Image (tube, helix red, strand yellow):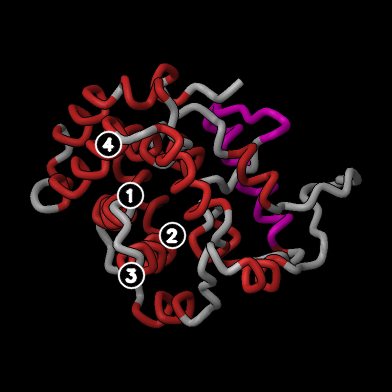
Amino acid sequence: MIKALKALSALLTYPTAELQQAADEISEAIESEPALSMPLGDQLHRLLRELASGDLYDLQERYVLLFDRTRSLSLHLFEHVHGESRDRGQAMVDLKAQYEKAGLELDSTELPDFLPLFLEYASTLPATEARDALAQPAHIFAAVAERLRKRRSTYEAVFRALVALSAVAPKADEVSALLALPDADANDLAALDAVWEDEEVRFGPGANDGCKDGLIARVRGGLRPAPDMPAATRARQ
């Protein structure tokens, strides 16, 4: 399961040439996990083939349109449950403390709820605890997967895989509540502006830099390398 979590983390990072070169390693990690057997494994390999052989600029543009410009597909977990409420700040602090307890250190540019980082944390846990960690946001994974299905995006497979690894059935009412929220088209700039128009939120005690968790924070977070796969996802310079 550890290898699978690392592979899924890599697949959700910003596409780079290094990620393309690590395709074989990621493929082996997917194949090593029984819970990711056919047809889910085939779907993950389809995404991996696209990432390995596609034009890098096209892949990067697709990633930004999906995950950086579309709030309903955000890779920041608390976006889906706390939005810009003040509860999100305490949730960030609590999650960061869990990471530090597990020996995972964050730098100043990283938001704790960034999904690839969360998967890195889960990969440090025993299998049972890792499943429990994945089970908590399983309804988020299911809702994002459904939105990606409607967009015919191969990234859907990653979120289906996360639900499978959590070994729980997401509660239908929780998934429905998320799917009822606005889901703007990334090409509809007016709708996107309306969705992103929120009050400023700050994270952690004494936070006073006025840093809004908007597109810049999301792009910055997306540059974090995947765990134990530094060659696959090294940040752009």
Question: Residue beneath label 2, please?
Answer: 136
Q: Main secondary structure of the magenta part?
A: helix
The mark closer to the camera, 4 or 3, is 3
The one nearer the camera, 154 or 139, is: 154
Q: How far is the residue under mark 3 from the one under mark 1?
A: 27 Å
Residues shaded magenta: 88-109
Q: Quadrant of residue 105?
A: top right
Q: Quadrant of residue 206?
A: top right
> Image check: 90 left or right of 67?
right
Q: Amino acid at mark 4?
A: Ala
Q: Amino acid at mark 1?
A: Arg
The one nearer the camera, 92 or 23, is: 23
Q: Which disc number belongs to residue 131?
A: 1
Q: Residue furthest top?
A: 231
> Where does the image place residue 181, in percent across and percent down from the top left?
53, 78
Q: What's the residue at 30%, 65% (across, down)?
A: 149
Q: How far is the residue under mark 2 from the one under mark 3?
A: 24 Å
Q: Which disc number belongs to residue 150?
A: 3
> Where does the image place residue 21, in percent across and percent down from the top left?
31, 20
Q: How far is the residue under mark 4 from the one under mark 1?
A: 12 Å
Mark 4 or mark 1: name the one nearer the start of the chain.
Answer: 4
Question: Residue beneath label 4, please?
Answer: 4
At mark 1, the secondary structure is helix
- Answer whether labels 3 and 1 touch (C-beta < 8 Å): no
Mark 2 or mark 1: name the one nearer the start of the chain.
Answer: 1
- Answer whether labels 2 and 1 touch (C-beta < 8 Å): no
Dot 1 crowding, Cα within 10 Å, few <14, some 14–19, many 20+: many
Q: Is residue 166 magenta?
A: no
The one nearer the camera, 2 or 158, is: 158
